[in-house]
Amino acid sequence: MIAPTKLLPPSEKSAMCQSVDKATEALGLKLLDEELNNLKSGNYVSLGRQNLGELGTLFIFASALSGKASGDSNDSISFHDLPQINANSKYRLGIPIYCWQDADSHRCLCLTLVGGEPAVFVSG
């Protein structure tokens, strides 16, 4: 597990749990229950144990979205650019790859690089 970030208030956890489950399912990520719980608690979750085929698809998707996030559809990013991309000031550094609206906040599942490994986190 990668260093924790912030904990969510209990009232926000239920809706976020459903949204995180939906996001990981839509992206084809197969996370362990412990990893899902860490993600739902606001922690980074390493994707280092994921199947390369799953990550390949995720990186192709992130590459396509990165140009939209930066405002330049011709932008090309590399693996090492991931932790430097700040698509929006309310996100930590990474590419938003799946977004949703919870009550009063906009959240995204974001892809980044932590300690040399791909990782995801929930922003917002």
Image (spheres, helix red, strand yellow):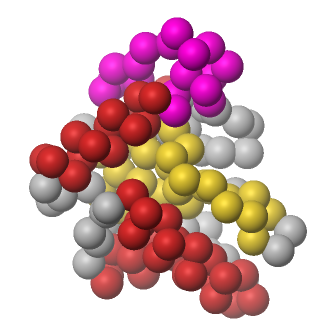
Q: Residue at x 26, y 69 (%)?
A: 30
Q: Position of residue 100 (x, y in %)?
A: 67, 61
Quadrant of the rendered image containing residue 106 = bottom right
Would residue 48 be found to the left or right of residue 110 on screen? left
Quadrant of the rendered image containing residue 123 = bottom right
Q: Is residue 29 magenta?
A: no
Of the 4 image quadrants, the one containing the C terminus is bottom right
Question: Could one spot residue 62 in this view of the protein?
Answer: yes
**As drawn, 33 above or below 85:** below
**As drawn, 32 above or below 88:** below
**As drawn, 85 above or below 110:** above
* Residue placed most toward the observer, 82 or 7: 82
Q: Residue at x 31, y 84 (%)?
A: 33
Would residue 48 be found to the left or right of residue 119 on screen? left
Question: Could one spot residue 48 in this view of the protein?
Answer: no
Magenta-drawn segment: 65-81
Q: Position of residue 112 (x, y in %)?
A: 42, 42
Would residue 117 be found to the left or right of residue 52 on screen? right
* Residue placed most toward the observer, 32 or 46: 32
Would residue 112 be found to the left or right of residue 59 on screen? right
Q: Is residue 71 magenta?
A: yes
Quadrant of the rendered image containing residue 7 = bottom right
Q: Position of residue 107 (x, y in %)?
A: 67, 59
Q: Residue at x 73, y 45 (%)?
A: 90
Q: Residue at x 51, y 46 (%)?
A: 97
Work out which residue is located at the far top of the displayed protein and give it. Answer: 74
Looking at the rendered structure, the number of numbered marks drawn on it comes to 0
Q: Position of residue 114 (x, y in %)?
A: 34, 44
Of the 4 image quadrants, the one containing the N terminus is bottom left
Work out which residue is located at the far right of the displayed protein and give it. Answer: 104
